[in-house]
Amino acid sequence: MSIRQNIENLKNELPETVKLVAVSKTKSVEEILEAYETGHRIFGENKAQELISKQPELPQDIQWHFIGHMQTNKVKYIAPFVSLIESVDSLKLLNEINKQANNIGRVIDCLLQFHIAEEETKFGLDFNEATGLLNSEEFQAMKNVRICGVMGMATFTEDTGQVRKEFYLLKEIFNRLKNKYFIEQESFKEISMGMSGDYKIAVEVGSTIVRIGSLIFGER
């Protein structure tokens, strides 16, 4: 099936409340354009270097989501155009995003990334680290970042029960943070969870953003 057909199938299947991020890492400008020409506008990249090289060659109305582990020294290169940084996993990183956004007069939307999987390799905060960040004077003083929700990745496993449990954990974290810190903020509404292998479970549990690569572009 073509990229066009894959995107159309996914959009027909996903509820209107769920945003589809087409994960375009390692994909060529031509492949991204093929997806773009279906009317799709939200794309996700996980390496700053790759994103910086592709962005100028592609239409400027693309909404780029950064979904990988972000190094602080790369923030300044994507700050001018990134739409959402989904992978904020430290106060240090958030500080840098705020600083670079301030330098160019932007407010950058961010998600807090949580470690919900049993795998050691995944990045992310735990609940106590997140509350420490949100309670800090440094965070309170930030004017150029906006926290819009949470992101997480489930364990890569065939055990759907475990995946569901981990997604429920992220949903619960979202609810606790919403009630304690963001009850007045309508913009705090995103739960980014679910990829090609587990997005159906994520949507059932309450995901608002799914990040899908191989089901759109084919296996790498």
Image (cartoon, helix red, strand yellow):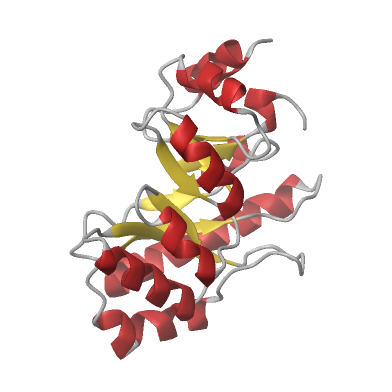
The quadrant of the image that shows the C terminus is top right
The answer to whether residue 204 is above or below residue 105 is: above
Viewer-proximal residue, 20 or 41?
Answer: 41
**Residue at x-position 36% and y-position 32%:** 60
The answer to whether residue 135 is above or below residue 116 is: below
The answer to whether residue 132 is above or below residue 171 is: below
Q: Residue furthest bottom?
A: 137
Determine whether, in the image, residue 193 is placed left or right of residue 19: right
**Residue at x-position 52% and y-position 70%:** 73
Q: State the image coordinates of residue 65 (x, y, percent, origin top left).
A: 46, 46
Instruction: Say which quarter of the image contains residue 61.
Output: top left
Mark yes or no: residue 37 visible: yes
Determine whether, in the image, residue 85 is placed left or right of residue 179: right
Q: State the image coordinates of residue 70 (x, y, percent, origin top left).
A: 56, 63
Instruction: Say which quarter of the image contains residue 7.
Output: top right
Viewer-proximal residue, 202 or 5?
Answer: 5
Mark yes or no: residue 203 visible: no
Determine whether, in the image, residue 132 is placed left or right of residue 24: left
**Residue at x-position 77% and y-position 29%:** 219
